Image: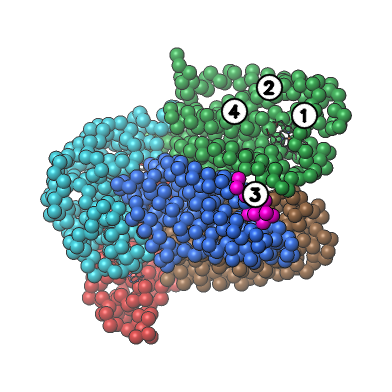
Chain colours: A green, B cyan, C red, D brown, E blue
Amino acid sequence: MSIWEYANPKKFMATTTPVIPWVSWASFGLILVGLGWGLFLTPAAENFEHSVKILFVHVPSVLMAINAWFMMLVTSLIWLVRRHHVSALAARAAAPIGAVMTLIGLATGAIWGQPTWGTWWAWEPRLTSFLILFLFYLGYIALWSAIEDQDTAADLTSVLCIVGSVFAVLSRYAAIFWGQGLHQSATFSADKETNIDPSFWWPAVLSMGGFVLFFIALVLIRTNALIRLRRAMALEARANRGAS
Amino acid sequence: MGYAQTMTRLTVTDLSCARGGIPVLDRVSFAVDAGQALVLRGPNGIGKTTLLRTLAGLQPALAGTVDLPEEEAAYASHADGIKATLTVEENLAFWAQLYGSAVPESVYDAFDLTTLRLRAAGTLSAGQKRRLGLARLGVIGRKVLFLDEPTVSLDTRSVGLFADYLRDTHLAAGGIAVIATHIDLGLDAPVLDLTPFKASATMAGASDEAFL
Amino acid sequence: MGYAQTMTRLTVTDLSCARGGIPVLDRVSFAVDAGQALVLRGPNGIGKTTLLRTLAGLQPALAGTVDLPEEEAAYASHADGIKATLTVEENLAFWAQLYGSAVPESVYDAFDLTTLRLRAAGTLSAGQKRRLGLARLGVIGRKVLFLDEPTVSLDTRSVGLFADYLRDTHLAAGGIAVIATHIDLGLDAPVLDLTPFKASATMAGASDEAFL
Amino acid sequence: MIALLIRDLRLAVRAGGGFGLGLAFFLIVVVLVPFGVGPEREILTRIAPGILWVAALLAALLSLDRIFALDHEDGSLALLATSPLPLEGAALMKALAHWLTTGLPLTLAAPALGFLLHLAPEAYGYLFLSLALGTPALSMIGTFGAALTVGIKRGGLLMSLLVLPLYVPTLIFGAEAVRRGAEGLATAVPLTMLAGITAGAFALLPFASAAALRVNLR
Amino acid sequence: MIALLIRDLRLAVRAGGGFGLGLAFFLIVVVLVPFGVGPEREILTRIAPGILWVAALLAALLSLDRIFALDHEDGSLALLATSPLPLEGAALMKALAHWLTTGLPLTLAAPALGFLLHLAPEAYGYLFLSLALGTPALSMIGTFGAALTVGIKRGGLLMSLLVLPLYVPTLIFGAEAVRRGAEGLATAVPLTMLAGITAGAFALLPFASAAALRVNLR
Ligand code: HEM
Ligand SMILES: Nc1ncnc2c1ncn2[C@@H]1O[C@H](COP(=O)(O)OP(=O)(O)OP(=O)(O)O)[C@@H](O)[C@H]1O
Ligand SMILES: Nc1ncnc2c1ncn2[C@@H]1O[C@H](COP(=O)(O)OP(=O)(O)OP(=O)(O)O)[C@@H](O)[C@H]1O
Ligand SMILES: [Mg+2]
Ligand SMILES: [Mg+2]
């Protein structure tokens, strides 16, 4: 039995539907424990006050935002090579989640930045390259929704995802170069993660694991929803064809 | 004029094709020999355009094979690829260059374009434009033509001119033509009615089949 | 159904018209009574499209008069004004609303669109699209129709459907139709060949005349 | 008339209709500017009102070519011209639909983007107000430009050239209102002028647009 | 292949072909910015490199929708796809034609416009050089974006949304080269990166564009 059997939409739905609640609850549990521990049971770092605790949301969301794009890249490649519908739909399902994770990362960063650097937003390379990632997500989602034929949309967005990945990496280096340029913003120092207290480590890991599971659950739910949508469209098309 | 000497034959075997992800035609088979034309018929929406696009390689077939000499097919549809700001001559010269051939003087006569040669294509009437679009076929020197309603907007005389060109120039030189049309071209060619090949509603091959 | 009771008659007197600034037709005169159709014929490029556009008021006449009831003319050409992303129903509903009328259920039958009602217009075949374009005429309730090659891409059955609609619905209710076409519609209507009205090369009225 | 408005809005939200894209374009241009001019805060604060207004203007501009061109290509425009709806009304409705799908979202989103450019806190209200007053004028003027160029295939760039100079007064008063607001100066004059431009545009340009359309249909 | 290039250039210089419009758009955007941000000399000098690059990028962007859309609408694209010319070659030629009609004129004209924005005298050479190295990449990346959206009617805005993020590295290195040049710093890195992006784009994107075109023609 090959793993590709799960590329059949029906098989995929049948397999994942019972798993979804488990993953969801596990993710809630991990996030609750991680955040509870992180927010209430860790000492406030000396120079950051309580605002540092937003780290337990900020860092996982930021990592998931990047990983979501990476997952889209892999599933896009699978779609192009093996033409498994579930793969394309999983990429489509992940995009809005990744975009929202990016937004959460940006927003929590901004909330964090306000007490830390005294500004909501700075054009610092890492933040900037994240903003660009958000733009890539926007373009990807817009292209999906602009094309009516689903297979065409899957093909074109896959090509975009691959080319976009290259340029996203390139953009990141460009942004670093740009930010390191002669006009480095004085308010910001890059070594923010150097003095993380070891007591932060465990809650951070838990919350990270929770976010990973949360992401997986969301992708599964959305993929299943998209499969159902395609199924409805297919049935409708079939009905129309029967009529004519 | 005459086309290259290799024996040409178009063989279509059990071809099924889809449009918009839905199977439209099921197991169409036919063969056309060098020097022959085939007329496709069938009611609106049966799948003539779909079949021709599949034959021309613009879209993949669901199943079945199309056997024709490489680099010999040309496709022509309602959209003629005419540039409004180029003159009739320039339009034809472009296609000739792209196919590495020259524009034979005879096409202007064959398609009654002599007086229009220097006119910008955008100022032609519907039928004149159509004639220009058809003249392209006389320029690119391809052996196997797939024509989708080539005589739309043409008056009776122009239809006659086109049929003459096909018969006396293209087919006589060993060419092949597959033509979808609703009117009678006056060609002495076998007719294939596509109605019996209509795909059943339950036929396999729809792109969304995996979801059912 | 029947159109408003005023006596309708289309009278064209000594109409000359130009296209692209060049006179095309010279002193065309004819009259069509309520309940009658007129078929325009003539070779490609003679000026059928030009004449119809002039009659519909889309371009000014060089000379002559067109006499027809106000707000009663409708024009239909190859370009059907169909929106690809709207469904067949939505397309028709829009035009009905714009003309302040409702979509009569009968048009779906008359133009064989019943099974296509919920399809996005962009996914129709050439002939199906054409039928939708023609169905618009049955929706807007105009008395005087100017039709430019209405049957392009239609199969024989659809041409018959359209002729039936014109004869039994439109003309029977006192409508008028002027139709440019190259094929035989099977309508029992007088034919006007435009060839004799071709403007001479020296005819006055060209837009650049003042420079000569 | 309302039928046309509804159809245009419906087309805009269908696949490929482009709703929301103007907004995304606005966002991107605002993001690109710091890449060009560098990340310094003071500079960005200084040029934020101008950049926001220029970006809004470009976003409005880029969606203009959909106003009439699609209808011209598929023949709808000729059919509209022979319909009972006067072309003036059609132009007005088209401008309105354009504003609803472009100007309005821009206005609502602009404050959030002001944030990215470190817009002075006092200026947010004025940014919103000036865009609310000015973007309808952008749509109406743009509709006129679209009507002028409807006969030209892919005339988008030409239209930009015709329209941008017409946008200058709106831009000047709009950006000025925000800049004055940021510095705590009186903003009554530029805001009144913006409102005046909008009112004037809606009163007169439908007629000019209809005239241009008639010429192009000939 | 050369036939396609010649045809595209010829179409560009014919009536309605849009040659020179990109340049005019560039000019107008550059002129609009002072209206938006105010006339102070130091500010303008400071933001000039960025504004010039952003404007060049927008001018390149706006002419992209002509690359394939016209050919798709009139059926040429399907005919090209069945012609002996491989689609990869067609994409390459299209990008080249776009650069010759847009990027090259922009590059040549940019120094003159730098003048309007009080660009630092030392920067002129770098402005020219960076545009000469970078604009071909803009054309090629844009061609890819145009290929992706060719099936969408009036997809210009969507294309902008797809293409602008791809333009970011080019923009950053381009503007940075000019800014560094203006301040007398080393410019070797950004210029090398620009050249690298251009080379990479021309080596790889024709294939991606051809793939996208094939999907769209299906
Ligand atoms: C405007 C405010 C902020 C925004 C938008 C923001 C955004 C981001 C982004 C985009 C990343 C991911 C980049 C990467 O993975 O390299 C990130 C990572 C991180 N940020 Fe922030 N951030 C902000 C403020 C802060 C502050 C004030 C701190 C610390 C005091 C901080 C600490 C971190 C840490 C520890 C990581 C993860 C480590 C890493 O992956 O490099 N951030 N932030
Ligand atoms: N994108 C699409 N999605 C679904 N169905 C489609 C799509 N495009 C076309 N069809 C359908 O596929 C069928 C075949 O269309 P095709 O254009 O090949 O017909 P045709 O024989 O050329 O008709 P005509 O004589 O009207 O040109 C039609 O019934 C049409 O409605
Ligand atoms: N812009 C233009 N400039 C100059 N001549 C033009 C222009 N447009 C059309 N013509 C010419 O005007 C004449 C009338 O064209 P028209 O389209 O009315 O012909 P038609 O009878 O409808 O032909 P068809 O049967 O081919 O549709 C044609 O000879 C055509 O070449
Ligand atoms: Mg067809
Ligand atoms: Mg005609």
Which residue is tagged 3? Answer: E186
On residue A209, the disc is: 2
* Mark 2 Cα shell of 10 Å, populated few (<14), some (14-19), many (≥20): some
* Mark 4 Cα shell of 10 Å, populated few (<14), some (14-19), many (≥20): many
Disc 1 to disc 4, C-alpha distance: 33 Å
Mark 2 and mark 4 lie on one chain; the one further toward the N terminus is 2
* Mark 1 Cα shell of 10 Å, populated few (<14), some (14-19), many (≥20): few
> What is the chain letter for disc 2?
A
- Element assignment for label 4: helix
**Pointers 1 and 4 in contact (CB under 8 A)?**
no
**What's the residue type where badge 1 is placed?**
Thr
Q: Residue at x 70, y 28 (%)?
A: A60
On residue C170, the disc is: none
- Element assignment for label 3: loop
On residue A219, the disc is: 4
- Element assignment for label 1: loop
Residue B98 in percent (x, y) is at: 30, 53
Residue in front for this viewpoint, E194 or B20: E194
Disc 1 to disc 2, C-alpha distance: 22 Å
